[in-house]
Image: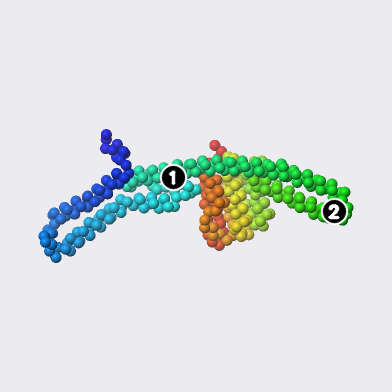
Amino acid sequence: MTEGAKRTTRSPAQALFRRLFMINGLVFAVATLVLAISPATVSAPLVLAEVPVLIVGLALMLAANALLLRRSLAPLDALTTLMQRVDLLRTGDRLPVGGNSDLTHVIATFNAMLDRLEAERSASSGHALAAQEGERRRIARELHDEIGQSLTVVLLGLKRVVDRAPGDLREDLHGVQETVRASLDEVRQVARRLRPGVLEDLGLHAALSALCSDVSQMSGVQVARAVQHDLPELGADVELVLYRIAQESLTNIARHARATRAELSLGTRDGRLTLRVTDDGQGGARQDGAGIRGMRERALLIGARLTVDSPPGEGTRVHLTIPNDRSPTR
């Protein structure tokens, strides 16, 4: 077996032990050599004048040993720091492989583990979100076809009753009519939020315009939009992720931001498709809630990068960047 094959089959623990043994052995060998060629002597019994020499020699040995060990084990500190901050929803955080040859295998193995976990997380999130979208479509269809039609029948029946009712009852019946009509409008709005039919029928540009208008109407927040007209051709999965992230961002603004104005922009920047949603609210979101984590999971499905910046008192900025290889339909 060659020497290269031996290094390959040696375990990381054996390699680290070998390095530490060689470092300590080198320090002791150098100290012994210096003691052998130097004029310093050690008497038995020990002479008081020799104590400073021994203390200086011991201090030099400890300092050299500590320096060499610290340099040798420095990648472990970086690896520990990465372990503490790693988040499978924030991809791409890796430790460079190189430098300390005995720890290269450990670092490469940890990076490979992160790759595998992120791939598995993305796949499982994809299945879960696909099931969620299917359930949303089913509920939206039932709301539209069953509850919506039932309320429509009730409205038609009330209209016939109003036409035949005496004058003193018509005002009360008109109030009931308006209540049923408002309930029907709410059911239709819920169905549209659950299943963006306008996205499937008219495309992303029209869907985002309708979304901004709905949010402005319901919350009172003025939503300005700037959607590039000549967007590259996108796949259905990319369009759905863009719409859902924009929807969740605007919903968070309407519910939590205490904002008066928001802005949604979508276009290509530096050859990459970029979605930005900003507001002038209170900001200060320190932890990712369920909504933001859901946006991160959706971004992972198309290999996009999502950043959320929310300094206190300066509003919130949601920034989604889609890589070049996912923008066009392939």
- Of 318 and 152, nearer the camera is 152
The numbered disc on residue 114 is 1
Q: How is the image coloured?
A: rainbow
The numbered disc on residue 97 is none
For the N terminus, the image quarter is top left
- Residue furthest to the top in view is 1
- Of 187 and 5, nearer the camera is 187
Q: Is residue 175 left or right of residue 30?
A: right
Residue at x-position 65% and y-position 57%: 221
Residue at x-position 35% and y-position 50%: 75
Label 2 vs label 1, nearer the camera: 2
The amino acid type of the residue labelled 1 equals: Leu
Q: Position of residue 40 (x, y in %)?
A: 13, 59
- The residue labelled by disc 2 is 170
How crowded pointer 1 is (Cα within 10 Å; few <14, some 14-19, many 20+) is rated as many
The amino acid type of the residue labelled 2 equals: Arg
Classify residue 237 by image quadrant. Answer: top right
Task: Kindly check if marks 2 and 1 are in contact, taking CB atoms under 8 A apart as contact.
Answer: no
- Residue furthest to the bottom in view is 48
Q: CA distance from mark 2 to mark 1?
A: 69 Å
Q: Is residue 322 visible?
A: no
Residue at x-position 62% and y-position 42%: 135
Q: Is residue 248 visible?
A: yes
- Residue furthest to the left in view is 44
Q: Mark 2 or mark 1: which comes first in sequence? A: 1
User: Callout 1: helix, strand or loop?
Assistant: helix
- Of 269 and 47, nearer the camera is 47
Q: Position of residue 107 (x, y in %)?
A: 37, 46
How crowded pointer 2 is (Cα within 10 Å; few <14, some 14-19, many 20+) is rated as some
Classify residue 113 by image quadrant. Answer: top left
Q: Position of residue 111 (x, y in %)?
A: 41, 44
